[in-house]
Image: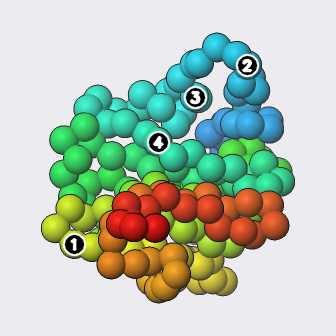
Amino acid sequence: MKQRGYAKYWILAIALWGSSTVFAKSFAEGPYLGQTPPGSTAQVFAPGLISDTQPKMWESHGTFSIDGNTFCYLRCPISLSPRIGGVFITENTDHGWTTPKLIESIGEYSPWAPCLSPDANSIYFARGLPESKRDFYRCDRTPHGWAVPQVLGPPLSSPSNEISCSIAANNSIYFGSIRKGG
């Protein structure tokens, strides 16, 4: 008889847990992370959601996928210490925007200037460690998460330092570099 009583409590606990996930508040809702699209006056983007979430941190290089349902950005400490911060991604689902998640496979590269491919299946970035050459890398999404980044090589990477890149809707890559004589 006592076991039946415990079974009722387990069923109630599972039902409450299931309903809490259904009614849980999403990170943000609506297109553009629920923000008003930009106008002619500069404003902090998604304060408390993307920007201004931690003291002594800053966010930059935000990129939306072409359908507007994936957003990728860089979060760094003001001190620019290596291996702190990183590239984060959030996605718009049927339940709203997911909490931004650190892409751990990119972390050891101290990424700089990440940009999301139009289809949201790749992230391009320059390696940001000051003591190493800054090549361009691509990190691809797999069914199991984000792969280990691969260096892009020439002509995108060169003996000079690479600064930033952007991927157009037609997948053309535009980049900035500190190259001599070019």
Amino acid at the residue labelled 3: Phe
Residue for badge 3: 45
Amino acid at the residue labelled 4: Ser
- Precedes in sequence: disc 2 or disc 4: 2
Q: Quadrant of residue 144?
A: bottom right
Q: Are marks 2 and 4 in contact (CB under 8 Å)?
A: no
Q: Closer to the observer: label 3 or label 4?
A: 4
Count residues near mark 4 (Cα–Cα under 10 Å), then give few for <14, some for 14-19, many for 20+. some
SS for callout 1: loop
The disc at residue 132 is: 1
Amino acid at the residue labelled 1: Ser
Q: Is residue 166 left or right of residue 168?
A: left
- Precedes in sequence: disc 1 or disc 4: 4
Residue for badge 2: 39
SS for callout 2: loop
Q: Quadrant of residue 96?
A: top right
Count residues near mark 2 (Cα–Cα under 10 Å), then give few for <14, some for 14-19, many for 20+. few
- Precedes in sequence: disc 3 or disc 4: 3
Where residue 8 sits in the image (x, y, percent)? 66, 57
Amino acid at the residue labelled 2: Gly
Where residue 94 sits in the image (x, y, percent)? 82, 51
Count residues near mark 3 (Cα–Cα under 10 Å), then give few for <14, some for 14-19, many for 20+. some
The disc at residue 60 is: 4
Q: Closer to the observer: label 3 or label 2?
A: 2
Where residue 62 sits in the image (x, y, percent)? 57, 45
Q: Is residue 32 above or below residue 92?
A: above
